[in-house]
Amino acid sequence: QLLVLEQRSQRLAVLEAENVRLRELLNSSANLDARVLVAEIIGIEADPNRHELILNKGTDAGLFKGQAVLDAHGLIGQVVEVGAISSRVLLITDAMHALSVKVNRSGVRSILAGTGHPDRLSLLYVPDSAEIAEGDLLVSTGLGRRYPAGYPVATVVSISHEPGQPFMTVEARPAAWIDRASHVLLVAGAPQSVAPVLEGGADGP
């Protein structure tokens, strides 16, 4: 009986933690300007070189390729493959992913690229004189029409300057709790034409 009660107690603790995360997600969705859908994460990519999630919703629920995916704290990635009842999301941490961001404090724009590490992103081609500091929040710009503008993406965690180099090295940590999310928000809207994930044009380096 003690074992059964302990197991039930542990299960209740798990459910309570899950409820807290769901409340955070729903509170976040109430603050968004856009209409959103909620989906559950039902799988992850087994290949360590690919940072992808599988969701339990697809075209039957209105999901489409290129759709932005968030948690309660920031952008997670985008839908890259859609079936009738499930879909696949490429995470912003994937080494093949990049998007246009700006420093929320100063407005400096740059390209934020995945590094293949779950908690590290890299800003590309940041001039050595750019107004950026550790702790700065990076938000999406909306350029390239891949992601809506104004969503938290990452926080700058380190900056280094190499003598004689025109660009500084800037690393950031994702705002989203990617490794802890169980449910996500998808920004609803009309499907858009899908460009390469490593954005070109206005988003490119």
Image (cartoon, helix red, strand yellow):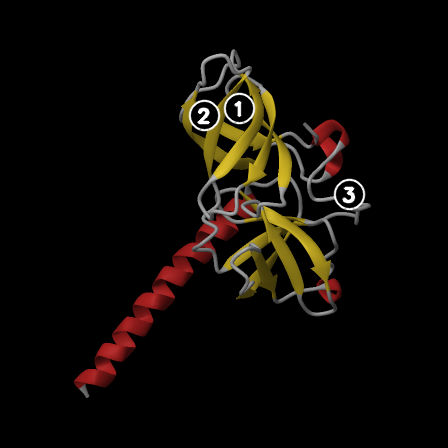
For the residue pair 197 and 47, the one nearer the viewer reads as: 47
- Residue 152 lies, in percent from the top left, at 53, 36
**Residues at discs 1 and 2 in contact (Cβ within 8 Å):** yes
Residue for badge 1: 104
Say which mark, if any, is on residue 195.
3
Residue for badge 2: 136
Q: Judge the density around disc 1: few (<14), some (14-19), many (≥20) Cα neighbours within 10 Å.
A: some
Q: Is 77 situated above or below 86?
A: above
Q: Judge the density around disc 2: few (<14), some (14-19), many (≥20) Cα neighbours within 10 Å.
A: some
Q: Is residue 147 visible?
A: yes
The amino acid at mark 2 is Asp
User: In this image, 182 relative to 91: left or right?
Assistant: left
Residue at x-position 67% and y-position 37%: 148
When asked about the image quadrant of residue 13, the answer is: bottom left
When asked about the image quadrant of residue 156, the answer is: top left
Residue at x-position 35% and y-position 63%: 16
- Residue 51 lies, in percent from the top left, at 56, 54
The amino acid at mark 3 is Ala
Residue at x-position 54% and y-position 30%: 123
The amino acid at mark 1 is Asn
Residue with the most extreme left position: 2
Q: For numbered disc 2, what is the local secondary structure?
A: loop
- Residue 191 lies, in percent from the top left, at 79, 49
Number of marks: 3
Residue with the most extreme right position: 193
User: In this image, 150 relative to 134: left or right?
Assistant: right
Could you tell me which quadrant the C terminus lies in?
Answer: top right
Q: For numbered disc 3, what is the local secondary structure?
A: loop
Q: Is residue 151 visible?
A: no
Mark 3 and mark 2 lie on one chain; the one further toward the N terminus is 2
